[in-house]
Image: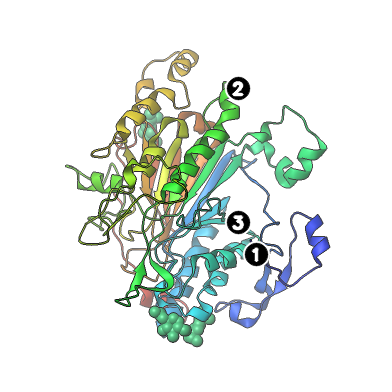
Amino acid sequence: MHHHFLVGSSFTAAATVTVTLFLLALPDRHQTRGQSQSQSHVYRRNLVDLAEPPPLTFSPKDGTFQISVFEDLHFGKNAWEEWGAFQDSATARVMNTVLDAEASTDLVVLNGDLISGENTYRENSTRYVDQIVEPMVRRGMTWASTYGNHDTDFNLSRTALWEEERKWLGSRTGRMVDHPEAGISNYYLPVYPAECGGRNMNRQLQDQQESSPACECDTPSLILWFFDSRGGRAYQSHYPVTGQPLGEQNWVHHSVVGWFKTTRASINAPSLTANEKVILSIGFVHIPTAASLAFQRSKGGVDASRQPGINDNVPLSPQGQEWCKGASSDDDGEEHNGEAKEVEEKEGCDYGDQYIPFMQAIAAASHGMMALFSGHDHGNSWCYKWDGKIPGAQVKRDMDQAVITAPGNEEQQQEEEGEGEGNGQGQKRGVNLCFGQRTGYGGYGSWIRGSRQIVVHQEELEEFVIRTHIRLENGEVVGAVTLNGTYGEDRYPVTRNERTHLVDSALEDF
Ligand SMILES: *[C@@H]1O[C@H](CO)[C@@H](O)[C@H](O)[C@H]1NC(C)=O
Ligand SMILES: *[C@@H]1O[C@H](CO)[C@@H](O)[C@H](O)[C@H]1NC(C)=O
Ligand SMILES: *[C@@H]1O[C@H](CO)[C@@H](O)[C@H](O)[C@H]1NC(C)=O
């Protein structure tokens, strides 16, 4: 681990204070157009590994936790053209519009493809990070990223991107899996109950001072998981013979699946031995899986009023696209002397089955996963309640168990409420597989830009409920749905399929 010493105080001072804030006036190059000098004050970490923002909590005001998801930002696309820079400032404006409208956002998630790596120059490819995080930094907000297939390329290193991001105090993007093939953005973030808000502000300190055993704040209410679906092209590497750029595997690596299973079990262990419930989770991964593809291809498929949203990328592009089936599907996620068993071929296949161990883990009852959010397909923005079926896999069985053992005991609820009607519906659980809304002006397609909003109410966690909507760049809200027991049956307004163009957007600036 390298420590990055930035401008600022002495090492000793930094080492004794867990969180050290720096006010730096950045040089001109960091400023986006139209921004005044006074907004150039930003918070930077002094030591990459030391300073962490305080733990996340549900809002003490209303008991909600809200996430704004930005995805497919594609900064740096066609950087050498004038309109390349226009695109980036238009993207920043989308982010600012959304954050102004969604003022109760507790966390921003950057769900992959932050940068168009294929259009970057080696010497400054990570410099876009400053522009990308500016809307959050300006508001004193924190964010957490997954990286996408465009975040690694011949001139863009995923590691360097992460290190650049980590210089910002607001970044919660972690790296918890060491395997060299695992990618970078594999980690989790706990979200604590609203009551812990004040207490958690300086958690480590507090824990030492009052070792009260009854502290509720030791147990999170919700876990956010971030998975790296990798992809793209290797940094500064070519195939020796052909000279072609080296393609990277584009699915969640088996070491990450193994890490997820064991970490999940250890997080749950204390509350399960205390006869409490599984701690529920929400996941983020840039590239969707073939579970969503199978639904899209199924008879009936995506219904505009039952799964509202845009469904223009048909077929969608899943993990393992263009790779042939490998031997990794029988992998239990454990490492075999550090060697990946799979021998995948990248030739002539639509997609391989490498995603199966990942989705089996996502479906497993004890993991309590309520929803998994992806980006990648710019023209898709629907949510689908997945029943756990993968052709040729046993995931459905795991999901049936999930119905029995998932939190929110139905019998108990029935007794308490004294009404049987409707409770049966609540049992129809599954993992909601959702696309967000493409946010960036770079990259393909002209679908209206926006951001998926995820709102979790602390008291609705018991009922396995998430509310979500899409905030568009024009300020409108579309696709507002409740991911509850009857999602997939309930009817909602159909989302209009609108387009926006850079020229309209750029004109607003003049
Ligand atoms: C990578 O960066 C170098 C140096 O800026 C540039 O000359 C080259 O064109 C870039 N290569 C690619 C594949 O983008
Ligand atoms: C990166 O370098 C290139 C070539 O020198 C330049 O055109 C481009 O504007 C630079 N990008 C950033 C983000 O500084
Ligand atoms: C789920 O939410 C929808 C929309 O709010 C509602 O109409 C439906 O009754 C809810 N279903 C359950 C089981 O609560």
Q: 51 or 170, which is in the foreground?
A: 51
Residue 116 can be seen in this image = no
Q: CA distance from mark 2 to mark 1?
A: 40 Å
* In this rendering, position of residue 303 left or right of residue 131: left
Marked residue nearer the N-terminal end (3 or 2): 3
> Label 1 CB, ligand 2: below 8 Å?
no
Marked residue nearer the N-terminal end (2 or 1): 1
Q: Is residue 508 above or below residue 384?
A: below
Q: Position of residue 171 (x, y in %)?
A: 60, 59
Q: Which residue is mark 3?
A: 142
- The disc at residue 500 is none
Q: Which residue is mark 1?
A: 2
Which amino acid type is marked by label 3? Answer: Thr
- The disc at residue 274 is 2
Q: Quadrant of residue 154?
A: bottom left
Which amino acid type is marked by label 2? Answer: Ala
- Dot 2 falls on a residue whose secondary structure is loop
Which quadrant, please, contains the N terminus? bottom right
Residue at the (47%, 78%) spot, across then down? 509
Q: Quadrant of residue 421?
A: top left
Q: 493 or 406, which is in the foreground?
A: 406
Please tell me in which quarter of the rendered image ligand 1 is found.
bottom left
Q: Position of residue 96 (x, y in %)?
A: 52, 64
Residue at the (74%, 62%) spot, across then down? 21
Evaluate if marks 3 and 2 touch, with contact meaning CB atoms under 8 Å apart: no
* In this rendering, position of residue 407 left or right of residue 289: right
Which amino acid type is marked by label 1? Answer: His
- Dot 3 falls on a residue whose secondary structure is loop
